[in-house]
Image (tube, grey):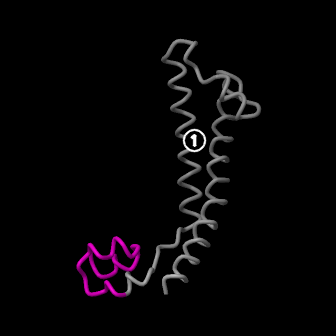
Amino acid sequence: MGPRDTAVVGPAAAAEVGDTTLDEARIGRWIMLNTKVVTWSLGLFGAVTFVVCVLYGLVVPETLHMTGALEAVLPGFRWITPVGFVIGLVESFLYGVYAGLVFTPIYNALSRRATARLS
């Protein structure tokens, strides 16, 4: 890790770096999450997870399907119709987007608060 890398780690991890910028990192400079990156990441994670669940449902016996859970959580989703698949994929993506839009500001606010207490 170079000098720039230590500025984005927490105080505990900075002690392991062995760099001249340790004092700056030790006072609690935490990385702030980028809302756009986290939102897209969680949206795509939700969509990929949905596809994995559907593929799993196509491979295993019907008694092991997640059909009931998916239909309960994703309004409009019906096992396994083309329209239902698209609706489920879009809704899964949007659930991830929602999580990113809610989680990131909360994390950043708490991170700022923790940094202020350490300074």
> Which secondary structure lies at badge 1?
helix
- 19 relative to 69, above or below: below
Image point (46%, 75%), residue name? 30
Specify the quadrant of the image occupied by residue 38.
bottom right
- Position of 11 with respect to 108 (left or right) is left
Q: Is residue 35 inside the magenta stretch?
A: no
Q: Over which residues does the magenta segment extend?
A: 1-23
Image point (66%, 59%), residue name? 102
Q: Nearer the viewer, residue 11 or 44?
A: 11
Q: Is residue 22 inside the magenta stretch?
A: yes
Where residue 3 appears, as percent x and y from the top left, is 30, 82
- Location of the N terminus (image quadrant): bottom left
- Position of 24 with respect to 87 (left or right) is left
Q: Residue furthest front?
A: 117
The residue type indicated by label 1 comes to Ala
Where residue 88 appears, as percent x and y from the top left, is 67, 34
- 30 relative to 83, above or below: below
Q: Which residue is mark 1?
A: 47
Image point (55%, 68%), residue name? 34
Where residue 70 appears, as percent x and y from the top left, is 66, 29
Specify the quadrant of the image occupied by residue 62.
top right
Around disc 1, counting alpha carbons within 10 Å, would you say few (fewer than 14), some (14 to 19), or many (20 or more)? many
